[in-house]
Image (cartoon, rainbow, N blue to C red):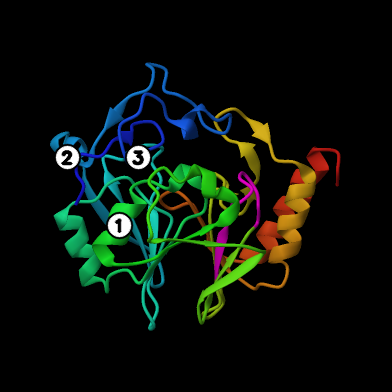
Amino acid sequence: MASDLPICRTCGVQYAEPRPDCPICEDERQYVGWHGQQWTTLAGLAAEGHRGRVEEEGPDVVGIGAAPPTAIGQRALLVRTPTGNVLWDMVSYLDDDLFAQVRELGGVSAIAISHPHFYGSMIEWAHAFDAPVYLHAADREWVARPDDAVVFWEGETHRIAEDLTLVNAGVHFAGGQVLHWSRGAGALFSGDILTVVQDRRWVSFMYSYPNFIPERPQVVRRALSLLEPYAFDRVYGGWWQRVVHTDGAAAVRRSAERYLRFTGEG
């Protein structure tokens, strides 16, 4: 495990080598910390007392995170399927204990990440579990640690397993992707491409969350059109317990309609 590579303290993304800046944080969709650019490492996070957090988030869906949280506090989700587990989204933290806990749950056969703010220590996880990382090619420029484990795909949809399909919704980032699981009543894993809000009957759409820049109406319409063919009861957002538990597809439709109405485009 490369425990000494630099990790941005604000966005939590691990870089291949030391550098003075974090391009992800300098972009208007993120921000540089108020005390300036600061760095840590996996070893540094462990020394500060961070540990893995593993908790159930839904049927055959296990949350993977850190306690106390790192970066912007997101958690990943281990989607457990008979043909292999998929890790959706990513965190900065990984140590031997967390690796062992995930291995006991069946390990990781593939990784897919919604957008660059959640890239975290994706290469460490990919190497630990010998798993490919699926990213949309439109976000290639944001990969901070290039590696052969990363698989870039193009187009609107990409199936990574029999019942798991990536959809390039394009919200927040051009390559912003969500993951649809067709098992049972269906589930959508959305990170904050479609973010589950505090009233967990709804989702919302933003170009920049920290700087409150709304997403363009035409982008929201395209995302809604691409998701229309998919049935799903649950929507799993990017943070602990941010889950729409029922009627998820309808929640996404009415949320988009509300968003467009308030932007004057409905």
> Which amino acid does the dot numbered 3 rest on?
Tyr
Q: Nearer the viewer, mark 3 or mark 1?
A: 3
Mark number, residue 15: 3
Residue 193 visible in the shown view: no
Instruction: Tell me, yes or no, whether the highlighted magenta stretch contains residue 175.
Output: yes
Question: Is 96 left, or right, of 15 in this rendering?
Answer: left
Q: Could you tell me if the residues under marks 3 and 1 are in contact, i.e. CB atoms within 8 Å?
A: no
> Which amino acid does the dot numbered 2 rest on?
Ala
Q: Could you tell me if the residues under marks 1 and 2 are in contact, i.e. CB atoms within 8 Å?
A: no
> Which amino acid does the dot numbered 1 rest on?
Trp
Q: Is residue 50 above or below residue 190?
A: above
**Could you tell me how far apart the alpha carbons at marks 1 and 2 are, in whole angstroms?**
15 Å
Circle 1 — which element?
helix
Who comes first in sequence, dot 3 or dot 1?
3
Viewer-side residue, 60 vs 46 = 46
Residue range in magenta is: 169-180
Residue at 20% x, 71% y: name it.
104
- Residue under label 2, please give it: 43
- Residue under label 1, please give it: 125
